[in-house]
Image: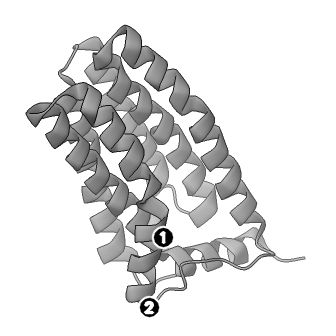
Amino acid sequence: MTAISEHQAEMRQSYIWGSTGVIVSGIVWLVAAAVAYLVSPQNAVWTLFIGAVFIAPVSGLLERSLGARGTHSAGNPLGKLAAEGLVFMLMCLPLAYGLSLYRMEWFFPAVLMIIGGRYLTFATLYGTRLYWALGVLLGGIALLGFYLSLEPHLVAFAGGAAELLFGLVLLVTKRGKA
């Protein structure tokens, strides 16, 4: 029997602690924030959805360019957890979209809450409690955005900045460490 720590070490090595995905996601959020501010929040919703499609492939390219595999072994059970978390997140996104049809300013807080919840599982995937901090931070931004009725671009910017900074810190401090 293989210890979970060995599977986590493989995930950390293969995906550089998940840092590249967090960085790319943060960039997508920042682009959506710019679209919300410069064009319209409705267009920003589609910017976020379309941009999200590119998070995994762009992250994989970054991982390989930085010397990581960008994939895990087929026998790693944490890969299944990652896929299940992704499916759960995708199942929740229509709810956020439905909220946007009712009140546009609820969309970005709802999505931040959804992805913040997904990041909580990354604590198990990568074996670091740092992802709890990111999940709680995004959840806090979501709650503030909701309760203060912040403009959509401000919520998207705050979430994107948090992800980008977290991802960069994770990349710089953890790269090469399994």
Helix, strand or loop for disc 2 = loop
Residue 7 seen from this side:
yes
**Marks 1 and 2 close (CB-CB < 8 Å):** no
Residue 9 image label: none
Residue at (57% x, 65% y) in the render = 126
Q: In this view, does 146 lie above or below 160?
A: above
Amino acid type, label 1 = Trp
Q: Which of 30 and 45 is in front in this view?
A: 45
Residue at (45% x, 85% y) in the render = 64
Give the spatial CA distance, label 1 vs label 2: 13 Å
Residue at (28% x, 26% y) in the render = 42
Residue at (74% x, 59% y) in the render = 80
Residue 36 shown left or right of residue 78 in the figure: left
Q: Quadrant of residue 77?
A: bottom right
Residue 67 image label: 2
Coloring applied to the structure: one colour
Residue 137 seen from this side:
no
Q: Locate the N terminus and report the quarter of the image it occupies.
A: bottom right
Q: Name the residue under label 1.
A: 17
Residue 26's x, y, as percent? 30, 53
Q: Which of 168 and 136 is in front in this view?
A: 168
Q: In this view, does 30 lie above or below 155?
A: below
Residue 88 shown left or right of residue 140 in the figure: right
Q: Earlier in the sequence, mark 1 or mark 2?
A: 1
The nearer-to-camera label among 1 and 2 is 2
Residue 151's x, y, as percent? 17, 22
Amino acid type, label 2 = Gly
Instruction: For label 2, count other residues whose C-alpha is less than 10 Å away and answer few (under 14), some (14-19) or many (20+).
Output: few
Residue 24's x, y, as percent? 34, 61
Instruction: For label 1, count other residues whose C-alpha is less than 10 Å away and answer few (under 14), some (14-19) or many (20+).
Output: many
Residue 118 shown left or right of residue 87 in the figure: left
Residue 21 shown left or right of residue 83 in the figure: left
